[in-house]
């Protein structure tokens, strides 16, 4: 995925291109300003998924890893509604798989109602881990990953391959014409 250097001064002066950094959708009615937050990798979610099956100590470790601070951009990004909807549905699917596999795991572990429940436990944990892996792999298509951020410069990894060129072209045009109002951009509000 390509990296984009967002400079706060350029964004304040010229705004952002009116296109989704996840899919490139430039339909004006579909774009929503969203605060860009996110972790640098999926290690936190993977750690939490594994710690669910480790008992009370694992639950505490999982809760502590979820409390670590996310990096965020100092400005909102225009993201299309379709990417937001896909991200939400992906999360709902993962939550459903996790609830189902956890329920089967705990019922067979503590209930002992199914003979040969060790095989069922292994299958439940496998389904939960595969669901978590699928979620971590697919969410990259709909999320801007922030690599570093401070007040002046933010470096983000965007899923849409053409977005860095689009952003640079936007900055060049805005600097050439001196305004971002006539260029179809989302200025700062």
Image (cartoon, rainbow, N blue to C red):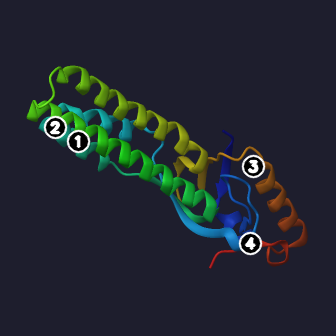
State the separation of the CA atoms marked 2 and 1. Answer: 6 Å
Q: Earlier in the sequence, mark 2 or mark 3?
A: 2
Label 1 crowding class (10 Å Cα cut-off): few <14, some 14-19, many 20+?
A: few
State the separation of the CA atoms marked 4 and 1. Answer: 43 Å
Q: Earlier in the sequence, mark 4 or mark 3?
A: 4
From the viewer's side, name the closer residue of 179 and 60.
Answer: 60
Contact (CB < 8 A) between labels 4 and 3? no
Q: Earlier in the sequence, mark 1 or mark 3?
A: 1
Question: Under tag 3, what secondary structure?
Answer: helix
Q: Can residue 152 be seen in the rendering of this structure?
A: no
Where is mark 3, residue-wise?
A: 164
- Looking at the rendering, in which quadrant would you find the C terminus? bottom right
Left or right? Give the position of 126 relative to 23.
left
Residue 75 position (above or below residue 126): below
Q: Can residue 122 be seen in the rendering of this structure?
A: yes
Q: Nearer the viewer, mark 1 or mark 3?
A: 1
State the separation of the CA atoms marked 2 and 3. Answer: 50 Å
Left or right? Give the position of 31 relative to 165.
left
Image point (34%, 35%), residue name? 128
Q: Earlier in the sequence, mark 4 or mark 1?
A: 4
Contact (CB < 8 A) between labels 2 and 1? yes
Q: Position of residue 19 (x, y in %)?
A: 73, 61
Q: Nearer the viewer, mark 2 or mark 3?
A: 2
Left or right? Give the position of 177 relative to 108.
right
Q: Which numbered marker is on residue 107?
A: 2
Q: Quadrant of residue 10?
A: bottom right
Where is mark 4, residue-wise?
A: 28
Residue farthest along the right direction in this orientation:
176
Q: Which numbered marker is on residue 103?
A: 1
Contact (CB < 8 A) between labels 2 and 4? no
Label 3 crowding class (10 Å Cα cut-off): few <14, some 14-19, many 20+?
A: some
Q: Earlier in the sequence, mark 2 or mark 4?
A: 4
């Amino acid at each position: 995925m390509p990296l984009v250097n967002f400079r706060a001064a350029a964004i304040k002066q010229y705004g952002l291109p009116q296109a989704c950094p996840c899919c490139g959708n430039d339909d004006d009615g579909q774009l929503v300003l969203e605060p860009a937050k996110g972790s640098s990798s999926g290690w936190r979610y993977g750690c939490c998924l594994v710690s669910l099956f480790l008992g009370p100590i694992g639950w505490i470790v999982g809760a502590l890893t979820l409390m670590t601070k996310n990096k965020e951009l100092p400005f909102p990004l225009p993201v299309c509604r379709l990417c937001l909807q896909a991200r939400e549905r992906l999360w709902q699917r993962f939550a459903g798989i996790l609830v189902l596999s956890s329920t089967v795991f705990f019922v067979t572990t503590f209930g002992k109602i199914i003979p040969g429940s060790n095989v069922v436990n292994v299958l439940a944990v496998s389904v939960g881990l595969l669901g978590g892996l699928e979620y971590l792999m697919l969410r990259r298509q709909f999320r801007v990953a922030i690599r570093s951020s401070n007040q002046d410069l933010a470096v983000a990894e965007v899923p849409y391959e053409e977005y860095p060129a689009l952003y640079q072209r936007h900055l060049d045009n805005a600097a050439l014409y001196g305004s971002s109002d006539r260029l179809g951009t989302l200025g700062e509000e």
